[in-house]
Amino acid sequence: MSEPARKASDLPLPGGNFRLFVTRLAFQAMISLGILENPLTKSRDVNLDTARMLIDDLRMLLEKTSGNLEPDEQAHLEKVVGDLERAWGAASAGRSAG
């Protein structure tokens, strides 16, 4: 006898994990930068204003949590912010040139 099919709604949502929280914000920024396909629209639309807002939020989080993070959390957040800043700069330059 086989188990009944499980749906995503049957599984608990993860929460309370700082790295996962940062990664979720980073994914939203990558969608806004057109790096990742939006799973709802199935398109890669660039929205620099939304991306900038998310990057600024992550930068604020970096500043406000200074001295309160585990070393791996700090390194993860710094890398995410740096990578997104560079991607935003490239996307912004691409918009200016085009």
Image: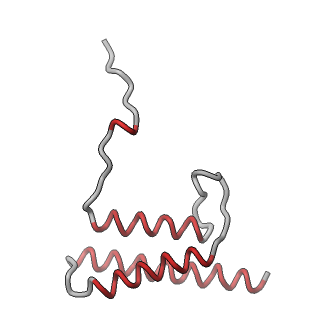
Coloration mode: secondary structure
Single out the residue that lies furthest toward the top: 1
Figure check: 7 above or below 53:
above
Residue 30 at x, y percent in the picture: 54, 68
Query: Quarter-wise, where is residue 80 in the image?
Result: bottom left
Q: Nearer the viewer, residue 76 or 5?
A: 5
Kindly identify the residue that appears in the image at 28 percent across and 57 percent down: 15
Image spot of residue 42 (x, y percent): 65, 52
- The quadrant holding residue 1 is top left
Where is residue 82? Give x, y as percent. Answer: 45, 83
Q: Is residue 1 left or right of residue 80?
A: left
Residue 70, image x and y in percent? 20, 76
Left/right placement of residue 92 relative to residue 53 reads: right
The structure residue drawn at horizontal position 57% and vertical position 74%, both measured from the top left corner, is 50
29 in relation to 64, above or below: above
* Quadrant of the rendering where the C terminus is positioned: bottom right
Which residue is drawn at the image coordinates 58% and 69% (left, top)? 32
Residue drawn at x 39%, y 66% is: 23
Vertical comparison of 15 with 8: above or below: below
Residue 91 sits in quarter: bottom right
Question: How many numbered marks appear?
Answer: 0
